[in-house]
Image: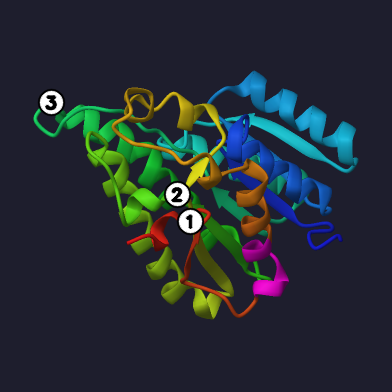
Amino acid sequence: MQRFRDRVAIVTGAAGGIGTAIADRLQAEGAVTIVADLKQEAAKAVAARLTGDHGGQALGLGCDVGVESQVEAVVREALDRFGRLDVIVNNAGLMTFKTLAEWTEEDWLTVIRVDLLGAAHFTKQAFLHGGEAGCAIVNVASIHAVQTSANAAPYAAAKAAMLSLTRTTSIEGRDRKIRANAVLPGAIDTPMLWDNPNVKSGAETIDPASVGAPADIAAAVAFLASDEARFVTGTSLAVDGGRLAKL
Protein backbone atom coordinates (compact mmCIF):
# COMPACT_ATOMS: atom_id res chain seq x y z
CA MET A 1 0.00 0.00 0.00
CA GLN A 2 1.52 3.30 -1.13
CA ARG A 3 -0.79 5.94 0.34
CA PHE A 4 2.01 8.51 0.49
CA ARG A 5 3.75 8.01 -2.83
CA ASP A 6 5.67 11.18 -3.77
CA ARG A 7 4.34 13.06 -0.75
CA VAL A 8 6.67 14.86 1.63
CA ALA A 9 6.27 14.23 5.34
CA ILE A 10 8.03 15.80 8.31
CA VAL A 11 8.10 13.77 11.53
CA THR A 12 9.50 15.44 14.64
CA GLY A 13 11.16 13.56 17.46
CA ALA A 14 11.75 10.84 14.88
CA ALA A 15 15.16 9.53 15.98
CA GLY A 16 13.68 7.04 18.43
CA GLY A 17 10.60 5.37 19.89
CA ILE A 18 7.22 6.31 18.47
CA GLY A 19 8.70 8.88 16.10
CA THR A 20 10.94 6.36 14.38
CA ALA A 21 8.03 3.94 13.98
CA ILE A 22 5.94 6.70 12.37
CA ALA A 23 8.74 7.69 10.00
CA ASP A 24 9.25 4.04 9.10
CA ARG A 25 5.55 3.53 8.34
CA LEU A 26 5.29 6.63 6.16
CA GLN A 27 8.48 5.78 4.26
CA ALA A 28 7.26 2.22 3.71
CA GLU A 29 4.09 3.66 2.17
CA GLY A 30 5.99 5.81 -0.30
CA ALA A 31 6.61 9.10 1.51
CA VAL A 32 9.68 11.26 1.20
CA THR A 33 10.37 11.49 4.92
CA ILE A 34 12.13 14.26 6.81
CA VAL A 35 13.38 12.86 10.10
CA ALA A 36 13.61 15.87 12.41
CA ASP A 37 15.11 15.46 15.86
CA LEU A 38 17.11 17.36 18.45
CA LYS A 39 19.84 14.74 17.93
CA GLN A 40 21.01 15.49 14.40
CA GLU A 41 23.35 12.53 13.93
CA ALA A 42 20.69 10.11 15.18
CA ALA A 43 18.20 11.69 12.76
CA LYS A 44 20.62 11.17 9.87
CA ALA A 45 21.14 7.55 10.89
CA VAL A 46 17.40 6.88 10.95
CA ALA A 47 16.98 8.53 7.55
CA ALA A 48 19.74 6.34 6.10
CA ARG A 49 18.09 3.23 7.49
CA LEU A 50 14.72 4.23 6.05
CA THR A 51 16.11 4.50 2.55
CA GLY A 52 18.01 1.26 2.99
CA ASP A 53 14.90 -0.59 4.16
CA HIS A 54 12.29 0.95 1.88
CA GLY A 55 14.05 2.84 -0.90
CA GLY A 56 12.99 6.31 -1.91
CA GLN A 57 14.30 9.46 -0.28
CA ALA A 58 14.65 10.45 3.37
CA LEU A 59 16.48 13.30 5.05
CA GLY A 60 17.69 13.60 8.64
CA LEU A 61 17.78 17.10 10.10
CA GLY A 62 18.57 18.51 13.51
CA CYS A 63 15.78 20.58 15.01
CA ASP A 64 14.87 21.97 18.41
CA VAL A 65 11.12 22.28 17.82
CA GLY A 66 10.85 24.88 20.57
CA VAL A 67 12.97 27.31 18.54
CA GLU A 68 10.89 28.78 15.72
CA SER A 69 13.88 29.66 13.55
CA GLN A 70 14.96 26.00 13.55
CA VAL A 71 11.45 24.89 12.59
CA GLU A 72 11.48 27.40 9.73
CA ALA A 73 14.85 26.04 8.60
CA VAL A 74 13.56 22.47 8.47
CA VAL A 75 10.54 23.46 6.40
CA ARG A 76 12.68 25.61 4.10
CA GLU A 77 15.04 22.66 3.54
CA ALA A 78 12.12 20.37 2.75
CA LEU A 79 10.70 22.83 0.24
CA ASP A 80 14.07 23.59 -1.34
CA ARG A 81 14.88 19.91 -1.82
CA PHE A 82 11.49 18.40 -2.56
CA GLY A 83 9.23 21.30 -3.52
CA ARG A 84 6.21 20.48 -1.38
CA LEU A 85 4.91 19.78 2.12
CA ASP A 86 2.07 17.30 2.54
CA VAL A 87 2.22 15.81 6.03
CA ILE A 88 3.46 17.07 9.39
CA VAL A 89 3.56 14.77 12.40
CA ASN A 90 4.22 16.70 15.61
CA ASN A 91 5.62 13.91 17.75
CA ALA A 92 8.51 15.52 19.66
CA GLY A 93 7.82 15.46 23.37
CA LEU A 94 9.42 16.07 26.75
CA MET A 95 8.20 14.72 30.08
CA THR A 96 9.81 15.60 33.39
CA PHE A 97 8.67 15.00 36.95
CA LYS A 98 8.26 17.32 39.94
CA THR A 99 5.49 18.18 42.35
CA LEU A 100 3.48 21.33 41.71
CA ALA A 101 5.27 23.03 44.60
CA GLU A 102 8.67 22.32 43.02
CA TRP A 103 8.08 23.48 39.44
CA THR A 104 9.76 26.74 38.48
CA GLU A 105 8.64 29.04 35.69
CA GLU A 106 11.57 27.89 33.56
CA ASP A 107 10.64 24.23 34.22
CA TRP A 108 7.15 24.92 32.87
CA LEU A 109 8.42 26.81 29.85
CA THR A 110 10.96 24.10 29.00
CA VAL A 111 8.21 21.50 28.66
CA ILE A 112 5.70 23.79 26.98
CA ARG A 113 8.22 24.95 24.36
CA VAL A 114 8.64 21.37 23.16
CA ASP A 115 5.25 19.78 23.81
CA LEU A 116 3.03 22.65 22.67
CA LEU A 117 4.93 25.43 20.93
CA GLY A 118 6.81 22.96 18.73
CA ALA A 119 3.50 21.79 17.28
CA ALA A 120 2.31 25.40 17.00
CA HIS A 121 5.44 26.41 15.09
CA PHE A 122 5.06 23.59 12.56
CA THR A 123 1.34 24.27 12.25
CA LYS A 124 2.12 27.86 11.33
CA GLN A 125 4.45 26.60 8.62
CA ALA A 126 1.68 24.41 7.21
CA PHE A 127 -0.52 27.48 6.84
CA LEU A 128 2.30 29.40 5.18
CA HIS A 129 3.60 26.68 2.87
CA GLY A 130 0.98 23.92 2.58
CA GLY A 131 0.27 24.72 -1.05
CA GLU A 132 -2.93 24.28 -3.05
CA ALA A 133 -3.18 20.58 -2.14
CA GLY A 134 -3.26 21.43 1.55
CA CYS A 135 -1.58 19.52 4.35
CA ALA A 136 -2.43 16.81 6.88
CA ILE A 137 -1.24 17.49 10.42
CA VAL A 138 -1.20 14.79 13.07
CA ASN A 139 -0.37 15.85 16.62
CA VAL A 140 0.87 13.12 18.93
CA ALA A 141 -0.62 14.06 22.28
CA SER A 142 -1.13 11.63 25.19
CA ILE A 143 -3.85 10.15 27.34
CA HIS A 144 -2.38 12.48 29.99
CA ALA A 145 -4.28 15.21 28.13
CA VAL A 146 -7.52 13.85 29.58
CA GLN A 147 -6.51 11.65 32.52
CA THR A 148 -3.19 12.13 34.27
CA SER A 149 -1.13 11.30 37.35
CA ALA A 150 0.84 13.24 39.93
CA ASN A 151 4.11 15.07 39.26
CA ALA A 152 3.62 15.64 35.51
CA ALA A 153 1.56 18.84 35.44
CA PRO A 154 3.36 20.72 32.61
CA TYR A 155 3.34 17.66 30.33
CA ALA A 156 -0.35 16.96 30.92
CA ALA A 157 -1.26 20.64 30.52
CA ALA A 158 0.73 20.97 27.29
CA LYS A 159 -0.81 17.84 25.82
CA ALA A 160 -4.31 19.05 26.75
CA ALA A 161 -3.54 22.34 25.04
CA MET A 162 -2.34 20.40 22.00
CA LEU A 163 -5.86 18.98 21.64
CA SER A 164 -7.25 22.51 21.63
CA LEU A 165 -4.63 23.55 19.06
CA THR A 166 -5.76 20.60 16.93
CA ARG A 167 -9.39 21.74 17.01
CA THR A 168 -8.51 25.36 16.19
CA THR A 169 -6.29 24.22 13.33
CA SER A 170 -9.10 22.16 11.87
CA ILE A 171 -11.42 25.19 11.97
CA GLU A 172 -8.98 27.71 10.50
CA GLY A 173 -7.56 25.18 8.06
CA ARG A 174 -10.76 23.99 6.48
CA ASP A 175 -10.78 26.45 3.57
CA ARG A 176 -7.05 25.89 3.03
CA LYS A 177 -7.42 22.09 2.80
CA ILE A 178 -5.47 21.67 6.02
CA ARG A 179 -6.67 18.82 8.19
CA ALA A 180 -5.53 18.41 11.80
CA ASN A 181 -6.09 15.45 14.10
CA ALA A 182 -4.53 14.19 17.30
CA VAL A 183 -3.51 10.75 18.49
CA LEU A 184 -3.46 10.04 22.23
CA PRO A 185 -1.04 7.19 22.96
CA GLY A 186 -1.46 5.21 26.13
CA ALA A 187 1.33 3.09 27.61
CA ILE A 188 3.68 2.36 24.71
CA ASP A 189 6.77 0.16 24.92
CA THR A 190 9.44 2.85 24.68
CA PRO A 191 12.20 4.10 27.02
CA MET A 192 9.98 7.08 27.85
CA LEU A 193 7.51 4.69 29.48
CA TRP A 194 9.95 2.53 31.41
CA ASP A 195 12.11 5.47 32.53
CA ASN A 196 9.04 7.18 34.02
CA PRO A 197 9.77 7.50 37.78
CA ASN A 198 6.07 7.04 38.58
CA VAL A 199 6.21 3.66 36.83
CA LYS A 200 9.52 2.72 38.42
CA SER A 201 8.20 3.53 41.90
CA GLY A 202 4.90 1.74 41.39
CA ALA A 203 2.89 4.94 41.84
CA GLU A 204 1.55 4.32 38.34
CA THR A 205 0.81 0.67 37.67
CA ILE A 206 1.00 -0.68 34.14
CA ASP A 207 -0.91 -3.80 33.18
CA PRO A 208 1.31 -5.61 30.63
CA ALA A 209 -1.83 -6.25 28.56
CA SER A 210 -2.28 -2.48 28.26
CA VAL A 211 1.18 -1.81 26.79
CA GLY A 212 1.16 -1.17 23.05
CA ALA A 213 3.91 -1.04 20.47
CA PRO A 214 5.19 2.06 18.64
CA ALA A 215 3.84 0.48 15.46
CA ASP A 216 0.32 0.74 16.89
CA ILE A 217 0.66 4.52 17.06
CA ALA A 218 2.30 4.65 13.63
CA ALA A 219 -0.67 2.83 12.10
CA ALA A 220 -3.12 5.34 13.55
CA VAL A 221 -1.00 8.29 12.43
CA ALA A 222 -0.69 6.88 8.92
CA PHE A 223 -4.45 6.56 8.63
CA LEU A 224 -5.13 10.10 9.84
CA ALA A 225 -2.46 11.52 7.53
CA SER A 226 -3.77 9.65 4.49
CA ASP A 227 -6.52 10.43 2.01
CA GLU A 228 -8.57 7.67 3.60
CA ALA A 229 -9.18 10.16 6.40
CA ARG A 230 -10.01 13.04 4.05
CA PHE A 231 -13.27 13.72 5.93
CA VAL A 232 -11.69 13.43 9.40
CA THR A 233 -10.44 16.61 11.02
CA GLY A 234 -10.44 18.10 14.50
CA THR A 235 -10.68 14.71 16.16
CA SER A 236 -8.70 13.11 18.98
CA LEU A 237 -8.10 9.37 18.74
CA ALA A 238 -7.06 7.43 21.84
CA VAL A 239 -4.74 4.55 20.99
CA ASP A 240 -4.36 3.08 24.44
CA GLY A 241 -5.63 -0.50 24.47
CA GLY A 242 -8.71 0.68 26.38
CA ARG A 243 -6.98 2.28 29.39
CA LEU A 244 -9.24 5.34 29.28
CA ALA A 245 -12.35 3.16 29.00
CA LYS A 246 -11.91 1.76 32.51
CA LEU A 247 -14.12 3.16 35.25
* CB contact under 8 Å: marks 2 and 1: yes
Q: Can you identify the residue that label 3 sits on?
A: 102
Where residue 119 is drawn, which disc sits there? 2
In the picture shown, does residue 37 fall above or below 209? above
Q: Pointers 3 and 1 in contact (CB under 8 A)?
A: no
Where residue 24 sits, quadrant-wise, is top right
Q: Would you say 8 lies left or right of 62 here?
A: right
Q: Is residue 12 above or below residue 183?
A: above
Secondary structure of the residue carrying tag 2 is helix
Q: Residue at x 50, y 53 (%)?
A: 240
Whole-percent x, y for residue 149 in the image: 27, 42
Q: Nearer the viewer, residue 89 or 20?
A: 20
Three-letter amino acid code at the position of disc 3: Glu
Q: Which mark is residue 123?
A: 1
Give 62 or 19, whichever is nearer the viewer: 19
Q: Nearer the viewer, residue 149 or 221?
A: 149
**Residue stretch rendered in magenta on the structure:** 223-229
